[in-house]
Amino acid sequence: MTSRKTLILIAAIAIGTVAAYVLWSYIQGVKDDLNEGAQQADVFMVTTDIPEGTRGEDAQRTSIEVRQIPNNIKPANAVTDLSQITGKVALSNMVTNEILKVGDFIDPSVKQTSFSDLLPEGMVTASINIDRVRAAGGFLAPGDEVNMMVLQDGWAEIEKQVDADGNEVPLTPEAIEYNNAAEATVFQQPARWFYQKVKILAIEDRLAPRAGEEVVDTGVTVTGGGIITIAAPPDAILRIMSVPSSAIVFTLLPDGYEAQVWTELTSDEIITDLLPGEDENYLTPYGPGGYDAFIDGNTDGAAIAFDEDGNDIGGPSSGSTGDSGGNSEPADSDENNPFGGGGDDANADEDQGE
């Protein structure tokens, strides 16, 4: 009985060995069929791990060999001549069987430059995770300047007050009208300009070009948002980081843009029955004349327009002073507006952000 079991075990091992060989032969045959007729290409392959900072000349002597791979899988940015890494150092750790690519070795002076070297004196950085929608559709680039907008969560309701005797003071008709309008208005996330001309230092791992660096125009790139690093003085960074990143929106600026005071959305605008598209003074975002008229300088009813040199050329018919500073008069002062919109409080907030 023992002898029979031994024979069965030997037979099973033999069958398994044969099956493994047949499977290996089949896989090799498939691989040969796939490679048959395929053009081979030479690449430089890493044969032993290369630590970060290794000199190119040292890597050539000990850790890089020429290997052949099918041409259709050769990376487009593969190194084609080892002179491309001579005098350079490894940007990061490289592992065995990695194909050597352009950019794996960089100039030592670039390698030794720290991120802090890119910061102007007196500035610090902050990084904000912004999705594509709030990052100007993803069309931001390192080095851009942007305006930073913050979105608030609705309007503050006017609450009843208590007099000196502890009795509740009824709301005025105006306050009741405001509370009803604040609840019903389409403007449910009031937006305000938080800072203007904010400098973007980096997006993810892409840095803004340094002074004197050649900038290669690769066309418009959609980044899709991501981690955006900005540079600003510490007091400004303190304010920026006090705002939830989910409430921040970046907007692109035209060339020649100059920072100026913009009036916030006021309570009288939420009480009115008219939306801009129903108001003959506005109709379009560019004024009654539309986009082309705005560009041509006809800014009646629009916000503020600029000529080709970036100079302010006017403002809306309802409230803009049209002066060179582009300031808008508040819609109501606190004296006339029982809700406090657009008055001294708004200006005080803007002053704080300067």
Image (tube, rainbow, N blue to C red):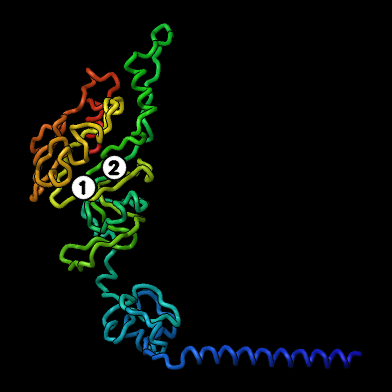
Q: Residue 149 carries which label?
A: 2
Residue occupying the point 17% across, 68% down: 214
- From the image, tell me which residue sits under label 1: 197
| Image position of 339 with respect to 229: above or below | above
Label 1, label 2: how far apart the Cα atoms are: 11 Å
Q: How busy is the neighbourhood of tag 1: few (under 14 within 10 Å), some, or many (20 plus)? A: some
Residue occupying the point 18% across, 41% down: 286
Q: Which mark is residue 248?
A: none
| Image position of 347 with respect to 26: above or below | above
Q: Specify which label sits upstream in the sequence, 1 or 2.
A: 2
- Give residue 212's position: percent from left, percent from top: 15, 65
Camera-nearest residue between 201 and 137: 137
Secondary structure at badge 2 equals strand
Residue 125 visible within the image: no
**Quarter of the image where the C terminus is located:** top left
341 to the left or right of 168: left
Residue 169: quadrant of the picture? top left
**Quarter of the image where the N terminus is located:** bottom right
- Give residue 216's position: percent from left, percent from top: 20, 68
310 to the left or right of 20: left
Under mark 1, the amino acid is Lys
Under mark 2, the amino acid is Met
